[in-house]
Amino acid sequence: MQPVITLWRAGDVPRLWLDQIAAWFLHEFHWPMAHTAPADWRVLATIGGDLIGHLSITERAATAGGAPVALAGIGAVIVQPGWRGRGVGRALLARAEAAMREETAADFGLLICEAHRLTFYTALGWQPVPGPLFFTSWRGERQQAGQHVLVLPLREGLTWPPGEIDLCGLPW
Ligand SMILES: CC(C)(COP(=O)(O)OP(=O)(O)OC[C@H]1O[C@@H](n2cnc3c(N)ncnc32)[C@H](O)[C@@H]1OP(=O)(O)O)[C@@H](O)C(=O)NCCC(=O)NCCS
């Protein structure tokens, strides 16, 4: 059986799956998903009705180098351990890319990742940018992200503005 990849409006995702995703998030990233920005869209991978993979898409008016930039933030990219290495992650990102282009007004996708995930994303067309990147924590404090920042231009001819990035809100 092949995994099925589907795009959901965030509000339509069943509670049971949201609870599963939150548990995966805590396990993988060691902080609560409740401290991240509410998603607008979710891409789910299911097999026989069971959830095996997920990512979130959050639209955000942010700034880069002081200029406004319309973002679609990709977060909580997780494939269940037994399903890794079979193309599910790549399929989730491909569906998300189509959704960002077709369903959002964003000019760039943006995600934050650890160094050991850089090759996974750059192979899918994501481009590292220097940042630094700041966000507002759930406590309302301005914080700098310690990880790598990657962007994906969603329209022709767009160049990422250099300089400090401010997500102007919660991270994803
Ligand atoms: C990252 C993750 C989502 C990848 O999912 P996946 O289904 O295993 O990925 P895929 O099978 O689609 O891999 C796609 C390609 O990336 C490669 N790849 C996957 N993980 C990689 C890694 N850590 N480093 C380098 N390449 C990697 C695969 O070999 C594959 O390349 P290929 O097409 O040449 O064979 C999965 O490992 C995961 O859930 N990790 C834990 C949570 C996490 O760290 N998420 C990312 C947060 S930014």
Image (cartoon, rainbow, N blue to C red):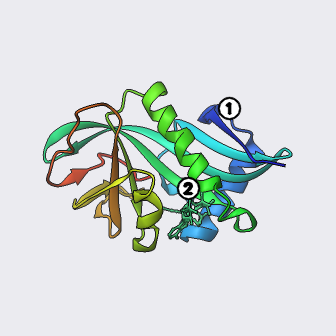
109 left or right of 65 in image: right
Report the Cα–Cα distance between label 1 and label 2. 19 Å
Q: Position of residue 6 (x, y in %)?
A: 67, 37
30 left or right of 47 in image: left
- Three-letter amino acid code at disc 2? Val
The quadrant of the rendered image in which ligand 1 is seen is bottom right
Residue occupying image coordinates x 43% and y 30%: 101
Seen in the picture, residue 146 relative to 38 is either above or below; the reply is below
Asked if the residue at label 2 sits under 8 Å from ligand 1, the reply is: yes
Seen in the picture, residue 122 relative to 18 is either above or below; the reply is below
Q: Position of residue 4 (x, y in %)?
A: 74, 42
Circle 1 Cα neighbour tier, 10 Å, few/some/many (<14 / 14–19 / ≥20):
few
Q: Element at badge 2?
A: strand
Frontmost of labels 1 and 2 is 2
Asked if the residue at label 1 sits under 8 Å from ligand 1, the reply is: no
Circle 2 Cα neighbour tier, 10 Å, few/some/many (<14 / 14–19 / ≥20):
many
Residue occupying image coordinates x 67% and y 54%: 21
- Three-letter amino acid code at disc 1? Asp
Q: Position of residue 78 (x, y in %)?
A: 61, 59
Q: Which residue is denoted by mark 1 in the rendering?
A: 12
Q: Which residue is denoted by mark 2 in the rendering?
A: 77
Across the whole image, how many numbered discs are drawn on residues? 2
Image mark for residue 93: none
Give the quadrant of residue 81.
Answer: bottom right
Labels 1 and 2 touching (C-beta < 8 A)? no
Q: Element at badge 1?
A: helix
Residue occupying image coordinates x 62% and y 35%: 7
Q: Position of residue 96 (x, y in %)?
A: 52, 40
- Name which of mark 1 and mark 2 comes first in the sequence: 1
Seen in the picture, residue 50 relative to 68 is either above or below; the reply is below
Residue occupying image coordinates x 32% and y 70%: 146
